[in-house]
Image (spheres, grey):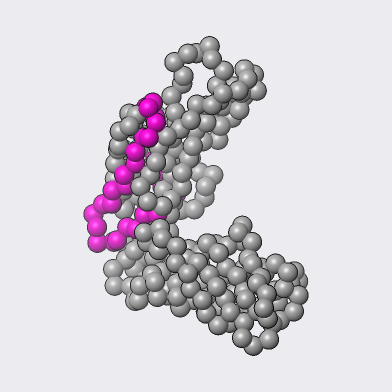
Amino acid sequence: MASLTAKSLWFVGCLSAALFGSGVADAGIVIQGSRVVYPAKEREVTIKMTNISDQPSLVQAWVDKGNDKLTADKADGPFLVTPPITRVEGKKGQALRLVYTGDDAAAKQQETVFWLNVLDVPPMPKDQDANFLQVAVRSRLKIFYRPEGLPGNPTQSAENLSWSLVQNAAGYSLRAKNSGAFHVSLTTVQLLAEGRTFDVKADDVQMVGPGQSVDFPLAGLKSAPKAGAQVDYQWVSDYGALNKHETKL
């Protein structure tokens, strides 16, 4: 079966709108959870999704290693997803099964992150003469493949990030170093110094992998603060909850 892509369907939708006017055909697939944790000891992991609309949707799912340009026919993630293509009736649910097919021996020292893609294609309207915009919606969720016996836990990796201030051509940045074995997904980062708050722009906030150091540019900081500066940050737990933590710089 030919691969469905969000890019091609979005183009068709935009072309239809340009030629025939406005109106929107909405998608309705909702995925349970915001991330997937795959313990290496499990034979498979199930992801539940629900079609909250009244109309059926066609859903295609695949896994990649981080390249969001890849379509299902070129997916490079070491997972078998079943069913790869399915029809989900309106107000009904469907489960996706993930089975790891990679070399487990190559990923025993730390977590590895992959991406689950779920492409939701709504149906064509029954009234073919009506003006409409058909949009395929693709959701991307992180899959954390987690080997057994890793030292510590995700909370410790997040709370034990070490922070330092570094200067570069553009100004100053906060450098986060993750000495743990788990990925830390940050949502906000800010520096509190000398009665002022310096934020990291939302687009610059990212995940810090095991053993990695990531620099977060600080907006507006012109000189290094004196002693007593504090870093406040939020990170996401396995269950999608936001957790706040603060530490001295």
Q: Position of residue 191 (x, y in %)?
A: 62, 74
Q: Residue at x 47, y 13 (%)?
A: 127
Residue 2 appears in the rendering: yes
In the rendered view, tell whether residue 134 sits above or below residue 30: above
- Left or right, 210 with respect to 214, comes to left
Q: In which quadrant is the C terminus drawn?
A: bottom right
Q: Residue at x 30, y 38 (%)?
A: 94
Magenta run includes residue 50: yes
In the rendered view, tell whether residue 145 sits above or below residue 91: below
Residue 80 appears in the rendering: no
Q: Residue at x 23, y 54 (%)?
A: 43
Q: Residue at x 50, y 26 (%)?
A: 25
Question: Residue 238: which quarter of the image?
Answer: bottom left
Q: Nearer the viewer, residue 103 or 181?
A: 181
Q: Position of residue 58 (x, y in %)?
A: 39, 30
Q: Nearer the viewer, residue 78 or 136?
A: 136
The magenta segment: 35-64
Q: In which quadrant is the N terminus drawn?
A: top left
Number of labels in the image equals 0
Q: Residue most toward the front? A: 195
Q: Residue most toward the top? A: 129
